Amino acid sequence: MSQPTFVLVPGAWLKPDIYSSVTKILQVHGYPTVSLPLPSAGAMPPNKTFDEDVKAIRDTLTNLVETKEKEVILVVHSYTGMPGTEAPKGLGKKERQKKGLKGGVVRLVFIMAFAMPEGFQPTAGGAQMPEWMKLDLEVGLIILHVSAASLSLRVLSFQVDCTLVH
């Protein structure tokens, strides 16, 4: 059986080469890797939604999962937890196995990342942020209320484990 492919997506202002030392180690051990740039990184004018980032991640996952029937470990960092949670929808290995299909996302790894529920859609005005996440446009910060976030993330962790882990 072949090794799963690691798809590594950097945070908002980083380039894929942030993972260069990690990809070298993974490749030495026989793991294929894809370091994916975000369309929003350096975009002018800045993107108002995360839709292009979701599409870039999803297109890569779809190619690996549906076209090449690969198992994939998606690794997201920081901001990319938001589009990275939305992108694999419908591509989980268990979900695909039930349909008699091969391949699928087998793990979703968050590195200091936002772990959001499926269907989450951030907006420039912060309109659909969870109640524990507030966007302060005057100072350009997202403020997290830790106690409420902790409870939400424990619930999300359970949901992600149930849907993506084989």
Image (cartoon, rainbow, N blue to C red):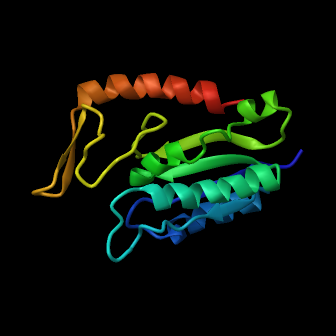
Tag count in the figure? 0
Quarter of the picture containing the C terminus is top right
Quarter of the picture containing the N terminus is top right
Q: Position of residue 19 (x, y in %)?
A: 55, 64
As drawn, which residue projects farthest toward the bottom? Answer: 44
Q: At 56% across and 50% down in the image, what residue appears? A: 75
Q: At 73% across and 62% down in the image, what residue appears? A: 27
Q: At 46% across and 27% down in the image, what residue appears? A: 156
Q: Position of residue 66 (x, y in %)?
A: 78, 50
Q: At 67% across and 65% down in the image, what residue appears? A: 24
- Tell me which corner region of the image, top left, top right, bottom left or bottom right, holds residue 44: bottom left
The residue nearer to you, when weighing 15 against 101, is: 101
As drawn, which residue projects farthest toward the right? Answer: 1
Direction from residue 102 to residue 80 in the image, left or right: left
Direction from residue 83 to residue 101 in the image, left or right: right
The residue nearer to you, when weighing 108 against 96, is: 96
Q: Position of residue 124 (x, y in %)?
A: 27, 55
Q: Is residue 71 above or below residue 59?
A: above
Q: Is residue 76 above or below residue 115?
A: below
Q: Position of residue 127 (x, y in %)?
A: 25, 43
Direction from residue 113 to residue 55 in the image, left or right: right
